[in-house]
Amino acid sequence: MKRVALVGGGVGVPPLHFLAARSVGSGVAMTAFVGARNRARLLGVEAFEALGVHTQVSTEDGSAGFRGTNVAALAESLEELPVGQVLACGPTPMLRAAAQLAAEHGIPCQVCLEARMACAMGACLSCVVETTTPGWRRYQRVCTEGPVFDSTDLVWETLSPLCAL
Ligand code: FES
């Protein structure tokens, strides 16, 4: 069975750890790709390992694990570790890179977005993102329709890094 790649950076790591904790024992093989700028900023590595989740560390300065981004680490490992699903949570540039890599390899990818939210209950529309999902409103609210979206449903060019945290 192909594995699930959990691609997390920064504040996106804890939600993926929560997901992994809920999935342990389900028979789904997982690899967590945890990335940060440097060793000091790595988050959640021991927590994933404590769950028994295969974990690949990457740092942009090479101070721990793979030198480069966690998406680059995923790309490099795809031949050895075939992936059937990418689940990504973290900074928008990381999500964009994960979505692009998944699309290039025909791997389904879901991304968990963050957005500035004024009401968090669907009323103010401060959190909308543009989507292409047929049959839905062109704009969807991260707080109510999200925060998890299929990466192919998002109009990435309009997803400003300034709108997402
Ligand atoms: S935060 Fe108000 S609609 Fe999403």
Image: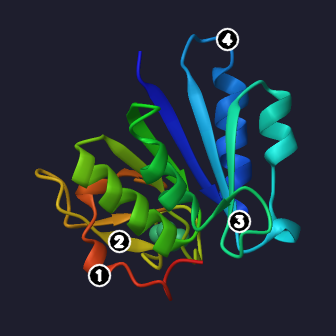
Q: Which mark is residue 20?
A: none
Q: Which residue was labeled with disc 4?
A: 25
The residue nearer to you, when weighing 164 against 63, is 63
Callout 2: SS: strand
Q: Residues within 10 Å of mark 2 (few under 14, many from 20)?
A: many
- Do we see residue 143 in this rendering? no
Q: CA distance from mark 1 to mark 3?
A: 22 Å
Mark 3 closeness class: few <14, some 14–19, many ≥20 residues within 10 Å: some
Q: Cα distance, mark 2 to mark 1?
A: 8 Å
Pick the quarter of the image with the C terminus. Answer: bottom right
Instruction: Identify residue type, mark 1.
Output: Thr
Amino acid type, label 3? Gly
Q: 73 or 165, which is in the foreground?
A: 73
Residue 99 in percent (x, y) is at: 35, 58
Q: CA distance from mark 2 to mark 3?
A: 21 Å
Looking at the image, the residue that sits furthest to the left is 134
Give the mark, 2 or 1, whose residue is nearer the N terminus: 2
Q: Nearer the viewer, mark 2 or mark 3?
A: 3
- Compared to 11, does 163 lie above or below? below
Say which element carries label 3: helix
How many other residues sit within 10 Å of disc 4, few (<14), some (14-19) or many (≥20)? few
The residue under the point 40% across, 35% down is 85
Residue 109's place in the image compared with 161, above or below, is above
Q: Which residue is mark 3?
A: 10
Reading the image, the residue beneath label 1 is 158
From the viewer's perspective, is 160 left or right of 44? Answer: left
Q: Which residue is mark 2?
A: 129
Helix or strand or loop: what does disc 1 sit on?
helix
Residue 43 visible (yes or no): yes
Identified by mark 4, the residue type is: Gly
Q: Earlier in the sequence, mark 4 or mark 2?
A: 4
